[in-house]
Image (cartoon, helix red, strand yellow):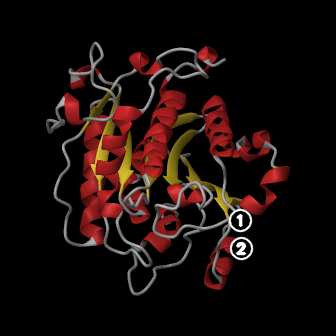
Amino acid sequence: MRRLNYLPADLAFLDPVRPGSAQPHLAKAVVIPFGLEQSVSFQGGTALGPKAILEASKEVELFDEEFWDEIISDYEVATLQPQPIAGTIESALKQVALMVRDVLNERKFPLVFGGEHSLTAGAIRPFVDLYDDLVVLQFDAHADLRDGYEGEHFSHAAAMRRVLDYKSLSLVGVGLRNISKEEIPFLEANRDRITLHWASDAKNWRIEEIVAPLKDKPIYVTFDLDCFDSSLMPATGTPEPGGLDWYQALDVLRAAADVGTIVGGDIVELAPRPGLHACDFLAAKLAYKLLSYALVDPSRLG
């Protein structure tokens, strides 16, 4: 088994000044920075996303009003040392798959910080080997069901298509407001595995219906930050109007953790912009919330 190489506490995710935080072997969660940026099609910058999230995390208040406690003390978080990313997307996906597998082999919860969304097709591979009924919960503005884009089979615009190459998986998408004509035949042919919830219908959503396919299932969460409305999250490659607000997203995420078991995830497509520190902070706080929902006994929620 390969030994995990961790960042020192002062560079790692969240405030390091806590008992146990300087001892990565005690952590139940591991952040994997993976700034893949090879198929962006509008605005670049995702390579800088992981570093921006880590830096912003130092300002996140650790006391969580939902749990009414500094809940991170229940699980602690370690952060892997970033690695140079392989030269092609396909080789990068193999690389991130190996990193996730190493974390799972240590019986820890992996959370990948991207980087572009194409990385999900690699990060999910070890989970496919572990679970035969895995459900992917996708927060996204885009369906990402193209069979490649601009000549790249593993493009960020094909992220969920490549995930669904694994026939045992099912997909629940939330917050969508873009799909191309070429994606429709695949969607229609796979209605038994794909359920999409459009942001335009959010006022009529019943959260219990959204998470019903997740009941008693292992869940992998992939959170493309462009799921949020562009007024809240402009620092992403393809910002879209009409997206979710903070509490709408958290309501779905919390409900998912209540009915199923979140086993891993990724937060992708942060493209930091000068002066837009709130976006970096949002991504860092989202990571804290995701980890807390996944790893803390829900009976502790208020």
Whether the residues at callouts 1 and 2 have beta carbons within 8 Å, the answer is yes
- Residue type pointed to by label 1: Arg
Residue that sits furthest to the right in the current view: 204
Task: Count neighbours of disc 2 (C-alpha within 10 A) and say few if under 14, some if 14 to 19, many if 20 or more.
Answer: few
Image position of 97 with respect to 74: above or below: below
Identify the residue at horizontal 31%, vertical 24% (top origin).
Answer: 27
The residue tagged 2 is 188
Q: Secondary structure at mark 2?
A: helix
Instruction: Give the SS element for disc 1.
Output: loop
Considering only vertical position in the picture, is 136 above or below 65?
below
Q: In which quarter of the view is residue 6 placed?
A: top left
Residue 175 as seen in the image, left or right of residue 21: right
* Residue situated in front as seen by the camera: 9 or 259: 9
Whole-Å distance between the Cαs marked 1 and 2?
Answer: 6 Å
Q: Percent position (x, y) of residue 211? A: 70, 42
Which amino acid does the dot numbered 2 rest on? Glu
Q: Position of residue 52 (x, y in %)?
A: 33, 49
| Side of 264 where 300 appears, left or right | right
Q: Is residue 78 above or below residue 135?
A: above
Query: Residue placed at 72% from the left, 59% from the top?
Result: 199
Res 139 seen here: yes
Pointer 1 residue:
191
Horizontal side of 294 relative to 206 (left or right) equals left
